[in-house]
Image (spheres, rainbow, N blue to C red):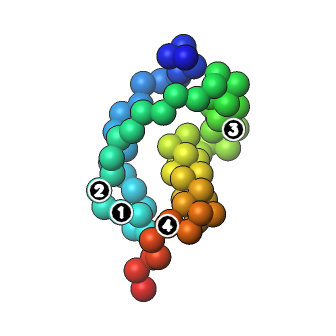
Amino acid sequence: MQEALEGAPAAAPEVAVSDAQESQVVSTHVLVPEDQAQKLRELSRRTRIAQSDYLREAVDDLLQKYGRKPEEPR
């Protein structure tokens, strides 16, 4: 399944995050099916939004769905 990431640029740890996000980030490695990786690359290319931004949004949505996302500080 390692080949699912072939052709994609090597991902460096993210260091720039918005003010709404945590100031510390953690690098993680996720294997996804080739068709999902290809669709994500294409979406990112068309919209000019980083794949990492989409992935962070997806994690936030998933955590919110299952009630595990911490509330934003007021």
The secondary element bearing badge 4 is classed as: loop
Relative to 67, residue 52 above or below: above
* Image depth: mark 3 or mark 4 in front: 4
Q: Residue at x 29, y 56 (%)?
A: 24
Q: Residue 47's x, y, as percent?
A: 67, 44
Q: Which residue is mark 4?
A: 69
Instruction: From this view, report whether residue 35 is shown above or below residue 70.
Output: above
Contact (Cβ within 8 Å) of mark 2 with mark 3 = no
**Which amino acid, by three-letter code, is at mark 4?**
Lys
Q: From the viewer's perspective, is the residue at label 4 or at label 1 nearer?
A: 4
- x and y percent of residue 39 in the render? 70, 31
The residue pinned by badge 1 equals 22
Residues under numbered marks 2 and 1 in contact, where contact means CB atoms less than 8 Å apart: yes
> For the residues marked 2 and 1, what is the alpha-carbon distance in whole angstroms?
5 Å
Inter-mark Cα distance, 2 to 3? 26 Å
Earlier sequence position, callout 1 versus callout 3: 1
The nearer-to-camera label among 1 and 3 is 1
User: At x 31% / y 61%, what residue is drawn?
Assistant: 23
Quadrant for the C terminus, please.
bottom left
Pointer 3 local density, CA inside 10 Å: few below 14, some 14–19, many at least 20 = some
Q: Which mark is residue 43?
A: 3
Nearer-N-terminus badge (2/3): 2
Q: Which mark is residue 12?
A: none
**Of the residues under marks 3 and 4, which one precedes in the sequence?**
3
Residue drawn at point x = 61 percent, y = 42 percent = 48
Q: CA distance from mark 4 to mark 1?
A: 13 Å
